[in-house]
Image: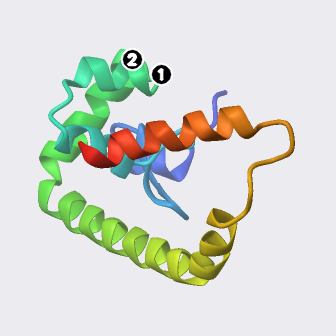
Amino acid sequence: METQTVNELTSPQTTVVRNSLGLAIAGTRLTLYDVMDYLKEDWPPKLIRDWLNLTDQQIADVMTYIEEHREEVEAEYEQVLAYADEIRAYWEERNRERFARIATLPPPPGKEALWAKLQEKKAKLAQT
């Protein structure tokens, strides 16, 4: 006899689950917020499927879930983005002095020509 989890008994589809990361794709380390990043950039579902190495069933279930729970998913996605911004700001501030000190270091010994070429490329990019 095959055993079923509680989630399988209460939900007809088990692709989207809630875990410690939030809404996630069962059997993967991917969240629905990962998929939302690509949807916000107007990627088609087939490309998202291929990029994230999902099955046809997984992407279909995820897209259905997002459509059926649009408000909930959007609200959680905004919270995830806000939290990520807080974390990024924290680490940028914490490492500001370290990055400034690293920027003043001389090129590694024997890498002076490569270093000069890199600085030239950075200068060109800054002009555009």
Cβ–Cβ under 8 Å for marks 1 and 2:
yes
State the image coordinates of residue 100 (x, y, percent, origin top left). 60, 73
Q: Is residue 52 left or right of residue 70?
A: right
* Label 1 CA crowd tier, 10 Å (few <14, some 14–19, many 20+): few
97 relative to 2, above or below: below
Helix, strand or loop status at disc 1:
loop
* Residue 56 placement: quadrant: top left
Cα–Cα gap, marks 1 and 2: 5 Å
Q: Which of 12 and 55 is in front in this view?
A: 55
On the image, the x and y values in percent for residue 88 come to: 47, 71
Q: Is mark 2 on a helix, strand or loop?
A: helix
Q: How crowded is mark 2: few (under 14 residues within 10 Å), some or many (20 or more)?
A: few
113 with respect to 50 (left or right)? right
Indicate left or right for 64 with 109 as reference. Answer: left
Give 91 or 43, whichever is nearer the viewer. 91
Give the labeled residue for mark 2.
Answer: 50
Vertical placement of 54 versus 124: above or below? Answer: above
Q: Mark 1 points at which residue?
A: 53
At 44% from the left and 23% from the top, the residue drawn is: 54
Q: Where is residue 105 in the image (x, y as percent from the top left)?
A: 72, 63
Which amino acid type is marked by label 2? Asp
Look at the image and tell me whether residue 2 can be seen.
Answer: yes
